[in-house]
Image: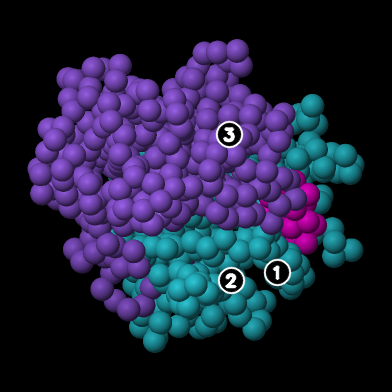
Chain colours: A purple, B cyan
Amino acid sequence: MNINPRAIQKSVEVLSNKKVGSYHHMVFSVGEMALHAKPGNFVAIAVGGNSSAMVLRRAFAIYRASDRGNFGGTIELVVAAHGSGSRWLSERAIHDRVDMVGPLGTAFGIPTEPVSALLVGGGYGSAPLFGLAEVLKQRGCRVDIVLGASNANKIYAPLEGKRSVNTMTLTTEDGGAGVKGRVTDVLPQLIEKHNTEIIYSCGPMAMLEAVDIIAQRFEILHQCAVEESMACGIGVCMTCVIPLKNDAGVIKMQRSCIEGPVVDGSKVIWGSSRQIPSGTWGHQSLGVQNHE
Amino acid sequence: MSDFQSFDFRTKFGSRYFPSPIFTASGCAGSGKELSQFFDLDELGAVVTKSIAVKPRSGRATPRMAETPSGMLNSIGLQGPGIDQFLADDIPWLQSKGARVIVSISGETIEEYATLARKLRGINALFGIEVNISCPNVENRGLVFSCDPVASRAVIEAVRRNIGGDYPIIAKLSPDVTDIVSIAKEVVSAGADGLALINTLLGMVIDIDAARPKLAGVTGGLSGPAIRPVAVRAIFQVHAALPNIPILGMGGVTSGRDALEMIFAGASGVSIGTATFGNPTAAIRVKEELLGLLQSKGFKSLKDAIGVAHG
């Protein structure tokens, strides 16, 4: 099995950096890296410059990738400046260069038949869903999208994104835009109304879990892009693991950068932060463990 | 351009020669497959594998990682497939890529180390065994082997007895001890051919919003440039006491300059660990920079540069 089979490492130029709501929409000139990027893939970027005290790479879901256009291949990201690394990236100016590795991770599975798809995004987790919507539309799928956040400023819903979906529903917890509440409050009626056959989701783990419960209740496929903090993005650090059940029913701690970020929601053992699910392969029952 | 022909970049641990002194650090190179997308593994002096245990290990729960100033804490819990699957899957693949392999082993009892050594006996591709003794000894209240000279000796003796042949044994020591030189002397007299200095330092981060330890495992191993001066100190002290024992130096090396510091302190080789997380090609960068630095300083061989800071 090849790992990271399409990934390359490259110094890439910032072509554009625009503030959109709470986020930064950034475009990078990446050459051939864009060629193999699929919706769901991510890139890993070194932050802070050469003398930085930030030693770990940051992972960002690809918002869009294009291998054509005036600048050759481009990759676009939606950056939420939550921490010192993402803030550094969001402060890069046009013509600055950053060290990027990509494309990495698994991609959303695309149905071979035209189906009715429901896309669910939380906060900036909506970013990879617009590229996915375009691909699904090209395959003749019906595409409905639900985007939710705590307030309207944190919903990432660009105008051009609306063109590739049949309907767009917004939810905010403060009621400032769309329906007051959470994405999961509107999912059941949307599923029934549009005869949804597959759900794609991206956002915080708690939201993915809540979406998965609804997907299971309606017995529909659910592909989700999981979020676990990573140190490298390329499968060597073993920090971004989540418990996944394989086809034989065995639970293993799997890297979300290699076996994910896109996984089958029904294979995830949810609610496993700070604990190893019982029955996990190789789980030590002894209290004594090595610190590494 | 660097001229490999005129410079002797080789290094030696026990009976084995390596064409370059830059190795990966245990637990920082995955199975090798992850990095081979970015460079050829035979460009490294050796691939040091993750520490492998007798049985499969799930490792610890998440969060397993916290970034710290110029470093990180990790609490992986030695996740791995166990020795049998490792020998069936990982070793043949690494061999097929021409990688020189040093297998790192970890146990919770002396008998487990002995078992691991027996299973590795007769595998011709091996260029050495790294014995990770920074593991809790379940037979002695969970006290880490490497903090106890008697337990450290017992582990190395058990590996030496069971490994057979002339495989180099490299003992990896913890810096979390009062006197690292006394531990080094014990393991060398027990049969270690070389020493890996240093393992991570035990550290901790509190999440002030949740008011609890950031890591699910509470404590974690600190690595990265933050610990480099500790590593240089340990290498310098041990080389002064045991000048004929080759040392594999590690701890926050990110550049050729950092590697040269360790070689001047007394290291015969240098492993790249956390730097690989920030840059998949860090080891290759360090190798090229180190070669350039050694040549620009007028050295004719790596060997001539080892320990020169001791005067």
| Location of residue A225 in the rendering, given as x and y in whole percent from the top left corner | 34, 43
Is residue A12 in view?
A: no
Q: Are marks 1 and 2 in contact (CB under 8 Å)?
A: yes
Q: Quadrant of the C terminus of chain B?
A: bottom right
**Residue B230: mark:** 1
Is residue B233 in view?
A: yes
Q: Residue B262 magenta-drawn?
A: yes
| Location of residue A132 in the rendering, given as x and y in whole percent from the top left corner | 35, 28
Find the magenta span and give its range: B253-267
Q: CA distance from mark 1 to mark 3?
A: 40 Å
- Which residue position holds label 2? B201
- Which residue position holds label 3? A26
Q: CA distance from mark 1 to mark 2?
A: 9 Å
Q: Main secondary structure of the magenta part?
A: helix
| Location of residue A273 in the rendering, given as x and y in whole percent from the top left corner | 34, 64
Q: Nearer the viewer, residue B292 or B111?
A: B292
Residue that appears at 39% across and 40% down: A126
**Tag 2 and tag 3 share a subunit:** no
Query: Chain letter of disc 3?
Result: A
Q: Nearer the viewer, residue A209 or B12?
A: A209
Could you tell me which secondary element the residue under label 3 belongs to?
strand
Residue that appears at 23% across and 17% down: A140
Q: Mark 2: which amino acid?
A: Leu
Q: Mark 1: which amino acid?
A: Val
* Quadrant in which residue A196 is drawn: top left
